Image (cartoon, rainbow, N blue to C red):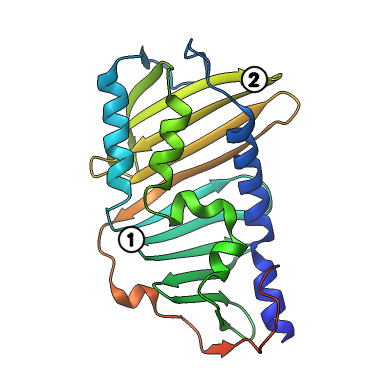
């Protein structure tokens, strides 16, 4: 089962980047000024209309199937991520790390972790294991979680907005900046017209600095059941085998 243990450990750099993202979100309380760090030329607005627009788009994310390839900036050697998103109960993530693609799949009650390269295989996991192993990926794997997170971050603050083109699509971007306990940070979310998440950018400065960023490079709304079929032969974990890395 050395191969199984190796594949379960493949998420370490992913978690490292998402821990940074969580730290940015957990330590930064947006200020009422809006602040800097927003796209150049953006307009600051505290109006309910802007907040309602962001709320609507983030809500659409919870119900819009999509296949999105992202460039990734963060800790570890991860450079690309492709998300197959079919809410409410199916998602798949392909991570490219050091030129090798590794995959997580959750489809209803079925969960798999798959490793490419020599001896390619998928390991079937208990239904709850993917969530336990990837606690910070809830924003991308749980319908409604992103909307809840955004609502908490923008409560009572000014939003800066801009219009951009990302992955060839029209995008509406929203950003906030805040400071708390000596820790500053900027959050930005960009959505396509159907609520597809085209960019997520979290930057922290101060005692803990760094960036977690996903930016779409290609988007398709064609997602089929076949996308959630394990790409390699499936092996079963023996009873009692640990499922956390």
Task: Kindly identify which residue carries mark 2.
Answer: 180
Image location (x, y in percent) of residue 184 = 63, 22
Looking at the rendered structure, the secondary structure element under dot 1 is: loop
- Vertical comparison of 152 with 37: above or below: below
- Vertical comparison of 14 with 199: above or below: below
Quarter of the image where one finds residue 134: bottom right
Give the residue displayed 66% in from the left and 67% down from the top: 10
Q: Looking at the image, tell me whether mark 2 or mark 1 is earlier in sequence order.
A: 1
- Vertical comparison of 62 with 35: above or below: below
Give the position of the C terminus as an image quadrant.
Answer: bottom right
| Apparent side of residue 153 relative to residue 115 in the rendered image (left or right) | left
Image location (x, y in percent) of residue 50 = 29, 22
Give the residue displayed 31% in from the left and 34% down from the top: 55
Q: In the drawing, what numbered circle is on residue 88?
A: 1
Pointer 2 with pointer 1, Cβ within 8 A? no
Depth order, front residue of 132/70: 132
Quarter of the image where one finds residue 11: bottom right
Instruction: Let me know if residue 134 appears in the view.
Output: yes
- Vertical comparison of 159 with 139: above or below: above
| Apparent side of residue 30 relative to residue 23 in the rendered image (left or right) | left
Give the residue displayed 55% in from the left and 34% down from the top: 202
Instruction: Let me know if residue 171 appears in the view.
Output: no
């Amino acid at each position: 089962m050395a191969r199984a243990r190796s594949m379960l450990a493949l998420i370490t750099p992913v978690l490292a980047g998402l821990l940074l993202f969580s730290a940015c979100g957990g330590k930064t309380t947006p200020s009422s000024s809006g602040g800097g760090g927003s796209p150049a030329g953006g307009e600051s607005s505290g109006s309910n209309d802007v907040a309602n627009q962001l709320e609507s788009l983030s809500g659409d994310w919870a119900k819009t199937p999509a296949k999105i390839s992202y460039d990734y900036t963060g800790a570890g050697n991860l450079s690309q991520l492709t998300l197959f998103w079919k809410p409410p109960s199916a998602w798949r993530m392909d991570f490219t790390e050091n030129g090798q693609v590794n995959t997580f799949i959750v489809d209803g009650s079925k969960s798999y972790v798959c490793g490419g390269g020599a001896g390619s295989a998928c390991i079937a996991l208990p239904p709850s294991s993917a969530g336990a192993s990837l606690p910070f990926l809830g924003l991308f794997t749980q319908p409604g979680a992103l909307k809840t997170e955004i609502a908490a971050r923008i409560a009572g603050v000014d939003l800066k907005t801009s219009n951009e083109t990302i992955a060839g699509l029209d995008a509406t971007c929203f950003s906030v900046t805040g400071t708390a306990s000596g820790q500053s940070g900027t959050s930005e979310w960009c959505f396509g017209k159907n609520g597809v998440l085209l960019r997520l950018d979290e930057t922290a400065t101060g005692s803990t600095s760094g960036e977690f960023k996903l930016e779409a490079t290609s988007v398709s709304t064609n997602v089929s059941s076949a996308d959630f079929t394990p790409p390699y032969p499936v092996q079963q974990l023996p009873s009692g085998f640990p499922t956390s890395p």
